[in-house]
Amino acid sequence: MLNGSKPPVRSLYVHVPFCAQKCEYCAFYSHAAQGELINRYVAALIREMELVASELVPANVFFGGGTPSLLNLHQWEQILQAMERLNLLGASEWTVECNPATVSLDKAKLLRSHGVNRISMGVQSLSETLLDRLGRVHSREMVFRSFDILRRAGFDNINLDLMFAIPGQTMDIWRHTLNEAVALGSEHLSCYEVIYEEDTPLYAQLQAGEFSVDEDLACDMYAELVDCAGRHGFQQYEIANFAQHRSAMPSEIPDHACRHNINYWRGQGFHGLGPSATGYTDGVRTKNWSNTTLYCEQLEKGRRAVEWREELSPLARAGETAAFGLRMNAGWPFDLFQRTTGFDLRSEWAHEMEDLVTQDFGRIDRERFHLTPRGLRFADRAAEQFLRIETPSRQGLSLNSAPRLETIAALC
């Protein structure tokens, strides 16, 4: 307990909004790096950490973006020293997202020496043509070089982000990428189908008829992913996530699963720091301003840069928790769901579960409800049936929507 009152928040997400350039498909809040603004952001982030540190004893930490590895050594030193001063080090899992173009041995060693023990590397493709198509700034050779650097720096838990159903990507290209990726020997794979978000160049190109979406090919690519990952020792534990399990004891959650994301999917609380970051503590969801300059201005005045906060009813929160948790292969054990939310899936959502079973999207066992492989392929459609729509009690200056189901999955 903190201050003898409520339990501490055990999960921390930090958003670093800077990129070398914006990718064609990206709808997350990010923008091109600007030297002085980065320094201003680092100072503001440290101020935000100071404001929440008394509530935090992080068991898992995740620096996402954007491109956290774009920060230089001095900027990282400032952040890490502040976290040490505020007693925020020591997480059992600490992930930093990296772009292969911005990995250096000095930076990797610095992160590792302060307790970062997991790297998520945004590879997306190992085809030079598709990397260019996506607007990525790295080459395939940078991927192999950066992976070697991370191993030399002592990282033994590395995730590779891959994308499939990219415009112009054939099954042969996808198979080749998968085979090369698993040959690297990483501990985790996060593999996402391209999502066409509005206000992205890729969406505009789709609307203009420059290419079409082949749903059958996308389904075949997903099936190939599941098969290839399984053959190479990866255990699927969520729609898009596969991890190695090195323990002799079998487990439905592999020991190299991303614990930070499991925290989301199991409806646990977390603090979100940085521009656009969402947080969820004590049943209240918050969102910071998606504007780096405004974010800095608010922190420079000594206050959180919160755009809005909202509180859902217990039932609405439980429905959202059910929806996110069904992304996991294990689904929801009935006892765990009731302990987490105070509601029983078998009574409040009996009709929805039976409907999904009828469609071969779900299975009801004695102890749990989970999606079938077919249901996992269309999990957002299935999970939305568990949501309980209401007008939330929201305070703030904006009525932006809550986090979408598919965006949570992209955090690994």
Image: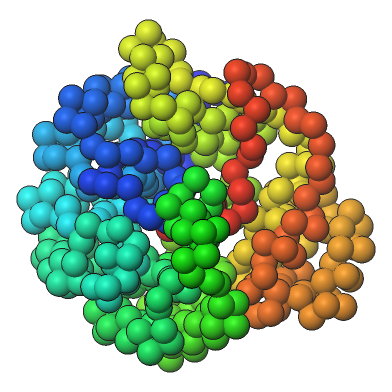
> In this rendering, is residue 105 above or below 253?
above
Residue 62 place in picture, x, y as percent: 38, 47
Name the residue: 67% across, 66% down: 379
**Residue positioned 67% across, 70% down in the render:** 378
Residue 262, image x and y in percent?
53, 57
Residue 346: percent from the left, percent from the top? 87, 62
Q: Is residue 192 above or below residue 399?
A: below
Looking at this view, name the residue that lies furthest to the left. Answer: 106
Q: Is 45 situated left or right of 281 in this image? A: left
Q: Is residue 326 left or right of residue 29?
A: right
Q: Give the answer, above or below, for where 229 lies relative to 21.
A: below
Q: List the single residue furthest toward the top.
A: 301
* Most foreground residue, 143 or 367: 143
Image quadrant assignment for residue 256: bottom left
Q: How is the image coloured?
A: rainbow
Does residue 17 appear left or right of residue 33 in this picture? right
- Left or right of 345? Residue 23 is left
